[in-house]
Image (spheres, coloured by chain):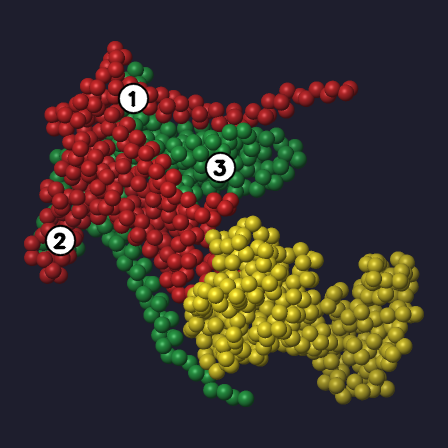
Chain colours: A yellow, B green, C red
């Protein structure tokens, strides 16, 4: 059933620029996607995700740059010759065809024999649990069902590259979680090179083999979900990933006897000796310190395994009790620091609190380039 | 890992060939429509000797003499008449049709669908049917050969369009805006005039232009209902029987100019409007 | 107070929409309904209110009656013009649905003929096709013809001139309807087809055409009904050489001074419109529309 060794293909974008009149949607995108990989394009609305996807599909021609599938440049190839499939953001399930005809359409176009079409449509319908809907028209379906038809239609041809543009954005929360794992499982099973667009970081983290974080027409970082979370390359990625957002504090770097002091207007954090060489060039300068709320602990909730640590003090300004977690807004004098801790802990507003920071998990960014140094 | 990347030349050629073919087809369409307008304007202003010289396609000497002759024959009066009739038609058809359009856009009521269907059907009804009997009636009412009479008949013709367009436009203004007005102390009429109307104004202005064009172009009813006080198309229709070529050219010229103005002022809206009313 | 009084103003507000529509209905009764009845009276009854076939006889057998010719030409013109118009308009709508530079200016140019009267359109093509018109001049100067082609005062050539003019003038209206319909189809529908490997023809055949069918039908109905009212173009280009129903109505009214006959002609046009409109509506129905969309 697979089309020989052409079934999987690696995809490369080389310096892709796209202008729409005066707006520049993409400012030079370089991206390499391996055979059978699931790559997520993640970024805020308007950053150019859809445009990137449409350029890979061939629905849009880049102003500059190249699109390469395997060893063939396809920049000017029309979509139908690219052996791709796509799930559109609004599904684009054709209203004048039944579910069956919708799914069968890509096969019909490829002149697959009728019995084979029937077999494959039923296979796809089964996989997405829409077998009983095959004779309905799209307007008789719910959003979730329509979305499954769109996915079934996209996988029935066994494309070289599967493109998905926020396919879950119109679904309710419960269905979204379910479809997330279903799509991921499906992709593992058919091993198709997949590019998936979303603005939802949870979706990206749970589904992607790798994530490309985009902002304002540029790729800010490409990496595994672990890398994106633990080693953000810059302030944008650090701030975009994680909830509540990472705390950013301006600090001045100062050499101390046995380490490095990070001096903010409200407190000083001391880093051990081994940081001296890393921060040599920044001594006397201002950097941006980044600490995730989940990497700070009130006294009594500090894990025993914590090795390098320091403490800061503040007054509880506001508490969000979320059940499983408690979010504490801590006033350290001139700044509010957000701390995420166990739901069993309920400090009172106005209470003075000491918070332990996990120094292994802090980030330091160059103030000018916003690039991560640590 | 450096693999050779193959670019197929034919892909690029195909891509640009497609662009060229599209541009060519558009150019043909635009020329086909625009050329008669351009040539009409040129020949209407052309020096007769050059026009009658078969070797000169584009004349070099121009004159306003033909236009002037047409004006002396009464074209100016007819133009004024046409404007008056069209403006009256706008006033009447909006005064009567706007409330109905509002009702269709904002209320659910019994018989709404049938009424709307009736109006949709009327829009395609050949209104020339009413011309002759109306004239008989107008003789009794003293409206025969008056601009008011023509405008009243044109109002009947324009009304279904005005109702459908205005209901479309008003439906396009979210009802929440009006409801917010009601919450903050306006009554329904006040909410309409202070909130919905200003928001709908650009669309309504385009609808007014649309109505103007309908009336301006209508010839059968106008020609039947008038003998002296003719609108421009009726005047020219009546004139061309025995007119010289240049008078005909000048007639075309005079009727075409406002059309050009309208399209370049309100083209975008007009395209949308025709889309609404004719579907 | 168990039985709360509903204020009169609230009770009345139920009737508000009817009040708003009332002026329209009254106007239509007076300016369309009444004239229609009067038209029938004029056509079939004499001054004393007695039924008479005098006008029918005059229409059919009166001196110089061109009724059958008028009926023939009205239908013939529609039959020749409409298929050409719909094809061109359809192609044009597909073309304008693509992206290309200068699209808006091209669009406004293409719809220009919509804003002029049929009399003006007739005169414009009188300019174009005259003995010294642009058409003849350019062909002669290019050496394609040696003598001008004469379009006017020759019946068959006048017919051709009318066809050309009507195609030029009223294709735009069909175009606009189809174009509006096309714009309502989400781009994603045919992009999806493109992604799944459909060629241009297949996209047209399986996606665009079926989705556009309702608009196409609407365009066809409207165009046909207006075609029966053809008047200004014919009158300016051919006069009564090519008789049409509306032209005969005008002639009966203004030259023969027989309002009864003129009314009869107008009623025939109305009857024809209603019959054809009903036929169209009966035959056209998209399958997926019946499924309740
Ligand atoms: N067809 C278009 N014409 C003009 N601007 C466009 C077009 N498509 C996208 N853009 C612009 O390009 C930018 C990126 O858009 P898009 O790729 O859709 O973003 P995303 O999918 O990330 O939300 C936006 O500023 C958008 O307004
Ligand atoms: Mg998008």
Asked if badge 3 and badge 1 are on a common chain, one would say no
Residue A157 falls left or right of residue A356: left
**What percent of the width, then of the height, locates residue C143?**
10, 61
Would you call the spot at circle 1 few (<14 residues within 10 Å), some (14-19), or many (20 or more)?
A: some
Callout 3 and callout 2 share a chain? no
**Mark whose residue sits in front, 3 or 2:** 3
Residue A313 placement (x, y as % from top left): 88, 68
Q: Secondary structure at mark 3?
A: helix
Disc 3/disc 2 C-alpha distance (Å): 48 Å
Q: Which residue: 60% across, 22% down?
A: C12
Q: Chain of mark 1?
A: C
Q: CA distance from mark 3 to mark 1?
A: 33 Å
Where is residue A226, by image quadrant? bottom right
Question: Mark 1 = which residue?
Answer: C40
| Labels 2, 1: front one | 1
Q: Residue at x 73, y 21 (%)?
A: C4
Q: Which percent across, then down, holds residue C72?
A: 19, 37
Instruction: Tell whether A149 sits left or right of C155.
Output: right
| For residue A24, side relative to residue C199 (left or right) | right
Which residue in the structure is indicated by mark 3?
B167
Label 2 sits on residue: C136
State the CA–CA distance, disc 2 to disc 1: 47 Å
Callout 2: residue from which chain?
C
């Amino acid at each position: 059933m697979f089309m020989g060794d052409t079934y999987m293909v690696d995809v490369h974008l080389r310096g892709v620029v796209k202008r729409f009149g005066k707006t520049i949607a993409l400012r030079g995108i370089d991206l390499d996607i391996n055979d059978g990989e699931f790559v997520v394009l993640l970024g805020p609305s308007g950053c150019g995700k859809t445009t990137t996807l449409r350029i890979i599909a061939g629905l849009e021609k880049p102003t500059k740059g190249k699109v390469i599938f395997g060893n063939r440049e396809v920049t000017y190839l029309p979509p139908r010759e690219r052996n791709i499939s796509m799930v559109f953001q609004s599904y684009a399930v054709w209203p004048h065809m039944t579910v069956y005809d919708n799914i069968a359409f890509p096969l019909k176009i490829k002149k697959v024999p009728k019995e084979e079409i029937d077999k494959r449509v039923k296979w796809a319908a089964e996989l997405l649990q829409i077998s009983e809907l095959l004779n309905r028209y799209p307007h008789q379906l719910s959003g979730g069902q329509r979305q499954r038809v769109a996915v079934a239609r996209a996988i029935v041809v066994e494309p070289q590259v599967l493109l998905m543009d926020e396919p879950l954005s119109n679904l309710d929360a419960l269905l979204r979680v379910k479809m997330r794992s279903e799509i991921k499982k499906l992709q593992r099973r058919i091993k198709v090179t997949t590019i998936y667009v979303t603005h939802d970081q949870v979706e990206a983290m749970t589904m992607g083999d790798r994530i490309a974080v985009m902002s304002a027409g540029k790729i800010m970082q490409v990496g595994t979900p672990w890398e994106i979370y633990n080693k953000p390359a810059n302030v944008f990625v650090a701030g975009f990933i994680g909830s509540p957002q990472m705390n950013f504090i301006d600090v001045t770097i100062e050499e101390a006897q046995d380490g490095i002091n990070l001096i903010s207007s409200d407190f000083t954090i001391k880093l051990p000796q081994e940081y001296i060489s890393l921060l040599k060039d920044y001594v006397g300068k201002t950097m941006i310190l980044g600490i995730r709320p989940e990497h700070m602990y009130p006294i009594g909730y500090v894990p025993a395994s914590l090795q390098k640590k320091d403490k800061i003090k503040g007054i509880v300004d506001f508490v969000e009790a979320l059940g499983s977690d408690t979010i504490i807004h801590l006033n350290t004098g001139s700044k509010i620091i957000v701390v995420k801790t166990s739901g069993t802990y309920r400090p009172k507003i106005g209470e003075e609190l000491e918070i332990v920071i996990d120094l292994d998990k802090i980030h330091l960014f160059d103030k000018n380039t916003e690039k991560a140094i640590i | 890992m450096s693999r050779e990347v193959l670019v197929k030349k034919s892909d690029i050629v195909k891509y640009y060939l497609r662009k060229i073919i599209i541009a060519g087809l558009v150019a043909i369409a635009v020329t086909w429509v625009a050329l008669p307008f351009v040539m009409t304007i040129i020949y209407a202003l052309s020096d007769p000797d050059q026009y009658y010289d078969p070797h000169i396609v584009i004349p070099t000497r121009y004159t306003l003499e033909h236009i002037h002759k047409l004006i002396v024959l009464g074209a100016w009066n007819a133009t004024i008449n046409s404007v008056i009739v069209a403006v009256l038609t706008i006033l009447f058809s909006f005064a009567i049709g706007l409330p109905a359009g509002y009702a269709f856009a904002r209320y659910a009521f019994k018989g709404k669908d049938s009424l709307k269907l009736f109006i949709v059907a009327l829009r395609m009804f050949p209104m020339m049917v009413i011309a002759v009997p109306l004239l008989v009636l107008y003789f009794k009412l003293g409206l025969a050969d008056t601009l008011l009479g023509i405008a009243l008949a044109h109002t009947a013709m324009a009304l279904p369009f005005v109702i459908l367009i205005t209901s479309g436009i008003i439906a396009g203004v979210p009802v929440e805006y009006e409801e917010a007005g009601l919450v903050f102390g306006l009554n329904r009429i006040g909410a309409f005039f202070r909130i919905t109307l200003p928001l709908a104004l650009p669309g309504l202005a385009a609808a007014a232009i649309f109505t103007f064009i309908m009336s301006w172009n209508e010839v059968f009813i106008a020609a039947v209902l008038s003998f002296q006080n003719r609108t421009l198309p009726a005047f020219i229709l009546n004139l061309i029987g025995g007119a010289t070529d240049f008078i005909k050219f000048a007639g075309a010229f005079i009727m075409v100019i406002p059309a050009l103005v309208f399209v370049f002022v309100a083209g975008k809206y007009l395209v949308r409007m025709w889309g609404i009313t004719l579907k | 107070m168990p039985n709360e009084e509903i204020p009169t103003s609230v009770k009345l507000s139920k009737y508000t929409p009817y009040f708003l529509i009332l002026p329209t209905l009254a106007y239509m009764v007076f300016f369309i309904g009444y004239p229609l009845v009067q038209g029938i009276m004029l056509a079939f009854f004499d001054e004393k209110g007695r039924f008479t076939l005098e006008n029918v006889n005059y229409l059919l057998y009166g001196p110089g009656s061109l009724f059958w010719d008028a009926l023939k030409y009205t239908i013939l013109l529609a039959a020749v013009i409409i298929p050409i118009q719909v094809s061109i308009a359809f192609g044009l709508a597909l073309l304008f649905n693509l992206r290309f530079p200068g699209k808006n200016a091209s669009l406004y140019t293409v719809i220009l003929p919509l804003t002029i009267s049929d009399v003006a359109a007739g005169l414009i093509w009188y300019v174009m096709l005259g003995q010294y018109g642009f058409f003849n001049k350019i062909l002669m100067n290019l050496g394609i013809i040696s003598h001008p082609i004469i379009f006017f005062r020759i019946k068959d050539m006048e017919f051709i001139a009318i066809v050309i003019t009507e195609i030029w003038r009223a294709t735009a209206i069909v175009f606009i309807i189809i174009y509006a319909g096309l714009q309502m189809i989400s781009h994603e529908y045919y992009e999806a087809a493109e992604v799944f490997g459909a060629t241009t023809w297949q996209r047209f055949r399986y996606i665009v055409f079926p989705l556009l069918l309702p608009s196409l039908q609407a365009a066809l109905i409207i165009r046909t009904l207006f075609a029966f009212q053809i008047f200004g173009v014919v009158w300016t280009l051919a006069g009564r050489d090519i008789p049409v129903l509306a032209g005969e109505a005008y002639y009966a009214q203004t030259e023969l001074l027989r309002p009864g006959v003129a009314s009869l002609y107008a009623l025939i046009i109305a009857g024809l419109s209603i019959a054809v409109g009903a036929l169209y509506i009966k035959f056209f129905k998209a399958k997926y529309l019946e499924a309740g969309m």
